Amino acid sequence: MNGKERLQATLRHRQPDRVCVDIGGTWVTGMHVSVVDKLRKAVLGDQEYRVRVVEPYQMLGEIDDELRAALGIDVIGRGGRKSLFGTDERDWKPFTLFDGIEVLVPHNLNTTVDEATGDLLAYPEGDTSVPPSVRMPKGGYFFDAIVRQEPIDEAKLNPDDNCEEFGLLSDEDVAHFRKARQWFAARAEYGAVAVIPGTAFGDIALVPAPFLKHPKGIRDIQEWYISTAMRPDYVKAVFEKQCEFGLKNIETLIEILGDAVQVVVITGTDFGTQRGLFCSLDSYRDLFKPYHMRINRLIHEKTNWKTFIHTCGSVWDLLPDLIEAGFDILNPVQCSAAKMDPRSLKREFGKDLVFWGGGVDTQKTLPFGTPDEVYREVRERIEIFNDGGGFVFNTIHNTLGNTPLANAQAMFRAIRDSQ
């Protein structure tokens, strides 16, 4: 099987010839650029090559065509035209990380240094004339959002202010996705995943709007979470407008992408914590599920695409609702969280959900374990989840920047030995 055939078999819950592998296909299944840099040099030997940072918020590195082939990765992916900072990939410029690794970043990723702390500050759309929207602590590996919440006047709260980032795809966006289809077509031997813009209802990474120069509405993280309980009508008004745009944009993307992709990422909203659900089942059913159902219904009625939800933590109790809402794929499969035992997940939900992730723990094992511990955990997870298909190997969320090269190599060695 090639990568596309392997992914198709997996999505149909059929046993592929070997486990299907995704590293770098999406913004939640990637690898920090520092690790990509070290891995690429070790595998391909090109010491002068600068890896591109394709997702600056988490500083994810590009898995280029040569490295993908060398590592045996099966899945490729494309997202929207702009990053979460409002930057684009029209051009690239050199950049040096805190750990000294030299990379390439988008041409309009502009930064300054906070003289008091040494932290790195970055700006929406690279505009340094406005306040910074994100901060990378000195010596850190990725950015954190800076909350730029204006004082809230309850009498003047307008849901439209939280919808500023949503709208119909522009001509530039359409052109971007047409190029994405060509890019997929040139790599037709791989499985393909696209990220649908604007359908991540309540994704907390988006609420502070690091891509907007002057965000309005409710943009403080705590205030937003409080609003789901205290201002549910406001939240529903935001989601309703967001959904209307999302449905229209999906119609456009169906026409553009067609059968060039097999999977679409719908949302990255986290509903779980390490110990249990982050919101009640009633809250999910009232605030989120109706919109998830509308989005998934349209996609399933008009395409063969499978829909992908990224939601961290202990979500066992939510899984029946996610299945009923129409999701086909669960990511990141956080096995270290309460109730998320791999064998139990596979036994109870393996017929209804494709598990995309869960391959190795990125909180402890991959960054802090020994290579032997990484190897054993990867082999065990593949044995459990890939039995009968329905499993795309990925780590539990993105590989962190402090992951030792030897551990990353052990992961790929275990994948290879599982064949």
Image (tube, rainbow, N blue to C red):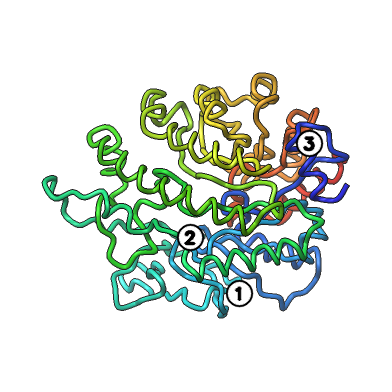
The spot of residue 356 in percent (x, y) is 66, 39
Q: Earlier in the sequence, mark 1 or mark 3?
A: 1
Count of numbered circles on the image: 3
Q: Which residue is at a point 78% across and 36% down the rendered structure image?
A: 379
Q: CA distance from mark 1 to mark 3?
A: 33 Å
Q: In the visual, does 217 lie left or right of 419?
A: left
Q: Which residue is mark 1?
A: 102
Q: In the visual, does 105 lie left or right of 234?
A: right
- Amino acid carrying label 2: it is Tyr
The numbered dot on residue 252 is: none
Q: Which residue is mark 3?
A: 379
Vertical placement of residue 74 versus 14, above or below: below
Q: Secondary structure at mark 1?
A: strand
Q: Counting other residues with Cα less than 10 Å from the Cα at mark 2, is it few (<14), some (14-19), or many (20 or more)? A: many
Q: Nearer the viewer, mark 3 or mark 2?
A: 2
Vertical placement of residue 29 versus 331, above or below: below
Tell me the quarter of the picture where residue 303 sits: top right
Q: Nearer the viewer, mark 2 or mark 1?
A: 2
Q: Secondary structure at mark 2?
A: loop
Vertical placement of residue 289 versus 250, above or below: above
The spot of residue 315 in percent (x, y) is 51, 28
Q: CA distance from mark 2 to mark 1?
A: 17 Å
In this rendered view, identify the residue nearer to me: 33 or 406. Answer: 33
Q: Which residue is mark 2?
A: 57
- Amino acid carrying label 3: it is Arg
The spot of residue 61 in percent (x, y) is 62, 63
